[in-house]
């Protein structure tokens, strides 16, 4: 592992994040809307109060000045505070992060656990009945948007069968095993929805990758040496085939986060996605800015991780 | 309805010919609020009715967990910072006012020992002061006693512009002084007929001095109690995640006997109205859901689930169409809709009358709002008509066409009327919200039949209801011919509400479109009546003045009222909870209980 390479990549990340923040900030500042809109319709709040609030929160300054203030504060670790709840933005995000990580993490785990064996089996037996079924399901899986499957599951499992709750609670009044069970029960539907969506596309990647590798000469060599089929698949095919898949999973992470936004809204999961939606609707610029910036950082970070992983897994690639 | 008639009705109540509730209903029908109606009665010597809650449990606690669903969760828990009902509802879980408004407009004492009145000498005859006796033995959640100092502090806190409270409008023009530890006196600069605004209802919740005393003014945001409220309410704070969750546990030292019934509560936020309705009415996962803005058809179908019921309550909200009086399409002195200009078409009376005839309120009620929005004659009023149910409002395309024809608007070859080369064409804007778009379509259809070309425009809610000076699409700019939205009367007294038609309130470039008169209607008679009402002490006379102002607005078709928006909420079958449109949803939380 080349340390210089890593340092260089991290340095390159700085200007790109800076650029992203400028674009985000400008777009948000230019977007119509007003955090104090609700006050405007309220006759009990005199216009002067609204104006004073605007001035106090610096909304009347020119955009470049506001951006500069934001940047300086950000570098000092001050994320600003929400106009709506008057709470520090980092507190808000930290409050919401565990739920998002839990749901996304389990969904991704399920996706990988399902997609790997299915993809490998389908890839090693192309055009078999199993492959056809897996393919069809995969297509169905990633053609159905999460908001649709989410509502479908709610209709079936909550309303018709009354098995699972469809409101996600971060604060469950139970202890011990009961608590664990309640937690799992409420997480089943959102995790399944996200996991299926992720898993479906992953199956396609794994299958394609396995198909490619299976045709390579060294696999034929391995087979001709008389190694059992099982060992050929696990030792020779899968190891090589997974290299691109691993990077794909890493690159997919930011997409998973954005996909979670919809799911969080449907199941009322108190994650950063629902925070983002609520803040956009309330024109709460500091929070929107912070959350989108966190997403941007994730994209940059996971890109970096993908590149590093790639080189680590595949010795043919050299860092320069 | 004039002063004389109002007095007649009051006599009726005194002699028993008319019930109190009947009187209140009549006053509400002419556009006044229930609290104002009861104040009129009170000033005329009819004591305010006791407002006893229905409460059956005989001991404190034991009710388990109360699960409530607010599809927009509270984002802050300081009542003085509350920007909307969700925040007020959330704050009210922990904080209490001196008194709250029940559904009939009566004051129900909470932290007050008794309700002030002229009879008990607490309300001065000249309308310049009111003295509140506070309940003794009330404890804050941290064990400290509640005293007059806390009440006085709330006034100091809220009126300071540096604190940036949203309750400033209620407190900036009054003076509050401590008489003794359990008595406070509120004094007004000028005779104030409606004295029960400060410390009552939505804007009256009281926060403790010992927790907020050091955080008045610029430091207000830093108070730890902003996020961890210490109140006097039936439940004490447990946890708060802005926009997501508020939880609380029973407060064993609560000042009302045997209350509350539940051991703890949970208020969950997020999601949407339809699924919230589902969680209460269909699956019974939750006990209560707030603000079910769901189409009637869907609501009824869900109720068949049998787990819960939807209830509607009267509020002061009216969905109405505003008419632009200035020219929104051409600039005069660099300003669109300048007061110096006149709307080329809508300034003509006949056109506005025709428009009012073209709004099919009955269909809007029947097909869109259902129980939650009865067609209204409110905001518009002519007392004879109110009594006759047949002439409440009229929908008549032929009559409208006839009016236009007589005014010289002749149909052109394309079916659109024109006069002097001007086409009868309007742009009609509203916010994006399914019922509103349907409503727009209903109006457009009728207008087309009468030969009016109507272009529909829909603006995203967050923009439409914004006050951004730079954005011309929001409702305060009203750079359009017609616009529709719900106007909310948040205070029981109509004085502030009715200033939206005063000439000096016109929304202009000069006041950065912060003026509340968005129709820019200018009428001297209205202005004079308004000014007179501001200082009129005789409640009957004052009420008559407001009704007269209503008449002016409606008879001149400055606005076209459509439906009266009632608040809908869902509740579990076995939950008893009293709601009121004149206070917030959780105003009576201490009396909520479950049976069976």
Image (cartoon, grey):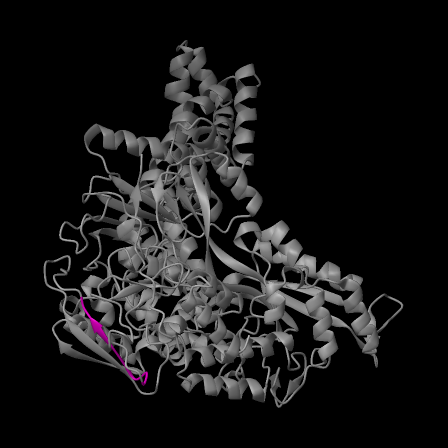
In terms of depth relative to the viewer, which is nearer, A225 or B324? Answer: B324
Q: Quadrant of residue B286?
A: top left
Which residue is outermost to the right?
A: B413
Q: Quadrant of residue A168?
A: top left
Residue lying at 34% horizontally and 46% vertically, measured from the top left = B68
Residue A234, magenta (yes or no): no
Horizontally, residue B333 falls left or right of residue B513, namely: right
Residue B132, magenta (yes or no): yes
Whether residue A65 is visible, yes or no, is: yes
Say how many tags the image has: 0
B35 w.r.t. A47: above or below: above
Check the picture and name the quadrant holding the N terminus of chain A: top left
Image position, residue A49 (x, y; %): 37, 78
In terms of depth relative to the viewer, which is nearer, B208 or A292? Answer: B208
Which residue is outermost to the front?
A: B15
A26 w.r.t. B365: above or below: below
Whether residue B469 is visible, yes or no, is: no
Image position, residue A166 (x, y; %): 40, 37
Image position, residue A142 (x, y; %): 52, 34
Horizontally, residue B369 falls left or right of residue B11, namely: right
Residue lying at 37% horizontally and 79% vertically, measured from the top left = B193
Residue lying at 64% horizontally and 82% vertically, measured from the top left = B326
Image position, residue A88 (x, y; %): 27, 62
What range is drawn magenta here? Answer: B126-134
In terms of depth relative to the viewer, which is nearer, B529 or A58? Answer: B529
Residue lying at 83% horizontally and 78% vertically, measured from the top left = B408
């Amino acid at each position: 592992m080349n340390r210089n390479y890593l340092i260089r990549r991290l340095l390159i990340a700085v200007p790109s994040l800076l650029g992203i923040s400028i674009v985000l900030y400008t777009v948000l500042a230019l977007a119509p809307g007003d955090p104090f809109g609700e006050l405007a319709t309220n006759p009990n709040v005199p216009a002067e109060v609204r104006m004073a609030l605007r001035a106090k929160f610096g909304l009347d300054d020119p955009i470049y000045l506001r951006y500069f203030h934001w940047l300086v504060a950000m570098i000092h670790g001050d994320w600003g505070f929400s106009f709506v709840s008057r709470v520090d933005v980092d507190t808000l995000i930290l409050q919401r992060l565990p739920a998002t990580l839990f749901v996304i993490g389990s969904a991704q785990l399920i996706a990988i656990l399902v997609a790997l064996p299915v993809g490998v089996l389908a890839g090693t037996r192309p055009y078999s009945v199993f492959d056809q079924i897996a393919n069809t399901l995969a297509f169905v899986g990633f053609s159905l948007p999460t908001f649709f499957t989410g509502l479908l599951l709610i209709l079936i499992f909550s309303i018709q069968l009354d098995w699972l709750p469809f409101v996600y609670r971060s604060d469950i009044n139970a202890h011990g095993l009961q608590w664990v069970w309640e937690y799992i029960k409420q997480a089943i539907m959102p995790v399944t929805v996200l996991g299926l969506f992720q898993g479906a596309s992953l199956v396609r990647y794994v299958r394609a990758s396995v198909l490619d590798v299976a045709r390579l000469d060294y696999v034929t060599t391995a087979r001709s040496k008389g190694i059992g089929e099982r060992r050929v698949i696990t030792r020779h095919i899968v190891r090589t085939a997974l290299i691109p898949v691993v990077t794909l999973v890493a690159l997919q992470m930011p997409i998973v986060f954005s996909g979670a936004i919809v799911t969080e809204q449907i199941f009322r999961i108190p994650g950063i996605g629902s925070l983002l939606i609520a803040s956009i609707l309330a024109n709460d610029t500091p929070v929107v800015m912070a959350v989108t910036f966190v997403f941007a950082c994730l994209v940059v970070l996971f890109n970096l991780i993908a590149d590093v992983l790639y080189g680590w897994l595949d010795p043919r690639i050299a860092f320069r | 309805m004039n002063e004389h008639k109002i007095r007649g009705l009051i006599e009726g109540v005194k002699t028993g010919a008319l019930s109190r509730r009947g009187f209140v209903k009549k006053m509400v029908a002419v556009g006044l609020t229930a609290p104002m109606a009861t104040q009129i009665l009170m000033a005329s010597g009819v004591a305010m009715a006791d407002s006893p809650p229905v409460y059956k449990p005989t001991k404190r606690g034991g009710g388990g967990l109360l699960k409530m669903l607010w599809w927009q969760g509270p984002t802050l828990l300081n009542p003085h910072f509350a920007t909307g009902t969700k925040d007020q509802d959330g704050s009210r879980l922990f904080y209490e006012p001196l008194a709250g408004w029940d559904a009939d407009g009566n004051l129900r004492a909470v932290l007050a020992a008794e309700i002030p009145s002229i009879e008990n000498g607490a309300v001065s005859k000249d309308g310049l002061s009111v003295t509140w006796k506070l309940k003794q033995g009330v404890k804050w959640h941290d064990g400290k006693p509640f005293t007059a100092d806390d009440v006085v502090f709330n006034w100091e806190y809220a009126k300071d512009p540096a604190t940036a409270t949203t309750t400033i409008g209620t407190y900036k023009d009054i003076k509050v002084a401590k008489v003794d530890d359990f008595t406070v006196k509120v004094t007004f600069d000028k005779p104030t007929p409606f004295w029960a605004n400060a410390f009552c209802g939505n804007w009256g919740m009281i926060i403790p001095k010992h927790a907020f005393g050091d955080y008045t003014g610029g430091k207000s945001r830093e108070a730890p109690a902003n996020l961890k409220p210490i109140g006097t309410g039936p439940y004490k704070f447990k946890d708060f995640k802005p926009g997501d969750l508020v939880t609380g546990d029973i407060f064993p030292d609560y000042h009302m006997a045997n209350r509350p019934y539940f051991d703890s509560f949970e208020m969950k936020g997020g999601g949407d109205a339809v699924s919230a309705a589902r969680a209460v009415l269909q699956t019974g996962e939750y006990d209560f859901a707030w603000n079910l803005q769901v189409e009637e058809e869907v609501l009824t179908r869900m109720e068949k689930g049998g787990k819960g019921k939807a209830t509607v309550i009267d509020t002061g909200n009216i969905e109405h169409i505003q008419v632009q009086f200035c020219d929104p399409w051409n600039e005069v002195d660099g300003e669109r809709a300048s007061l110096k200009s006149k709307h080329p078409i809508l300034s003509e009376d006949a056109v506005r009358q025709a428009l009012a005839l073209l709004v099919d309120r009955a269909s809007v009620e029947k097909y869109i709002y259902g129980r939650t929005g009865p067609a209204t004659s409110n905001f518009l009023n002519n007392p004879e008509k109110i009594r006759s149910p047949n002439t409440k409002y009229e929908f008549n395309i032929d009559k409208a066409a006839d009016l236009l024809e007589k005014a010289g608007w002749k149909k052109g070859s394309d079916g659109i009327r024109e006069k002097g080369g001007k086409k009868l064409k309007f742009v009609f804007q509203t916010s994006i919200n399914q019922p509103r778009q349907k409503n727009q379509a209903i109006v457009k259809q009728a207008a087309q039949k009468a030969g009016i070309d109507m272009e529909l425009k829909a603006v995203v809610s967050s923009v439409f209801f914004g006050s951004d000076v730079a954005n011309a699409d929001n409702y305060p700019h009203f750079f359009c011919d017609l616009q529709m939205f719900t106007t909310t009367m948040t205070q029981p007294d109509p004085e502030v509400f009715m200033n939206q038609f005063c000439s000096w309130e016109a929304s202009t470039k000069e006041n950065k479109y912060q003026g509340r008169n968005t129709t820019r209607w200018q009428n001297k008679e209205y202005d004079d009546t308004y000014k007179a009402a501001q200082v009129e002490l005789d409640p009957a006379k004052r009420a008559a003045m407001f009704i007269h102002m209503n008449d002016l607005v409606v008879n001149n078709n400055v606005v076209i009222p459509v439906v009266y928006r009632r608040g809908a909420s869902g509740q579990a079958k076995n939950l008893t909870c009293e709601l009121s449109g004149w206070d917030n949803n959780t105003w009576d939380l201490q009396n909520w209980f479950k049976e069976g």
